[in-house]
Amino acid sequence: MMKLAVASLSVLLLAQACVDNSANCASWRSNGFCSSTFYTTAYKTQYCPASCGLCSLVSTTASTTGCRNTNSNCASWVSNGFCTSTAYTAAQKAAYCPVSCGLCVSTTAASTATTKTSTTGSTATTKTSTSATTKTSTASSTSA
């Protein structure tokens, strides 16, 4: 497998996902990683928030920019296996190339109709307006 050269990849946790960023979290947890005072809470949250029960510490602020690739090399990374590689965490894939990796989720809220009727003298006027809300976000999942 061709190894992708990615400078300074840092683990970024996205709003809607509390996922472990290491395939070793289950064994680390059973070996005391989550309860150890040797590791900081920030370190545990960075690598194993789900396994250590630290999801409440993961940022839940949604991006106002929507779901978009943040790296200009995504096309070549995808052709080299970035999206399917287990060498990169789901959070890394979602942080850098969510569009290219197919991680964007679009949800549309049910349309709502509002009807207003006003009567002036003997004339009735009815106005109906509809609205729909579309939200695009990034979904990430754990990879084993």
Image (spheres, rainbow, N blue to C red):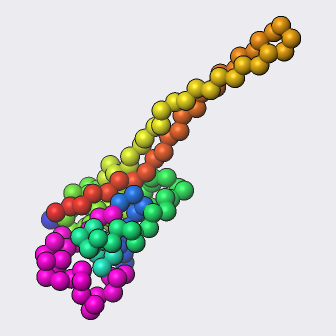
Is residue 18 shown above or below 108? below
Identify the image quadrant of the C terminus: bottom left
Relative to 37, is 28 above or below?
above
Quarter that holds the N terminus: bottom left
Picture mark count: 0
Give the magenta-colored segment's residue range. 18-43
Point out residue 2 in the picture as x, y percentages from the top left corner. Answer: 19, 66
Q: Which sits in the foreground, 102 or 18? A: 18
Q: Position of residue 105 (x, y in %)?
A: 38, 46
Q: Is residue 26 left or right of residue 132?
A: left
Q: Main secondary structure of the magenta part?
A: loop
Asked whether residue 40 is drawn in magenta, I would say: yes
State the image quarter where residue 116 is shown: top right
- Residue at image location 55% in from the left, 30% down from the top: 112
Q: Quadrant of residue 3?
A: bottom left
For the point 33% across and 76% down, the residue is 45
14 vs 126: above or below: below
Where is residue 98 drawn, in percent x and y?
37, 55
Q: Nearer the viewer, residue 132 or 100?
A: 132
Residue 110 counted in the magenta span: no
Which of these two is toward me, 45 or 97? 45
Tell me if I can see residue 72 in this picture: no
Q: Residue at x 33, y 63 (%)?
A: 18
Q: Is 4 placed above or below 132 here?
A: below
Percent from the top left, x then y, of residue 96?
38, 62
Tell me if I can see residue 133 in this picture. yes
Q: Residue furthest toward the top?
A: 122
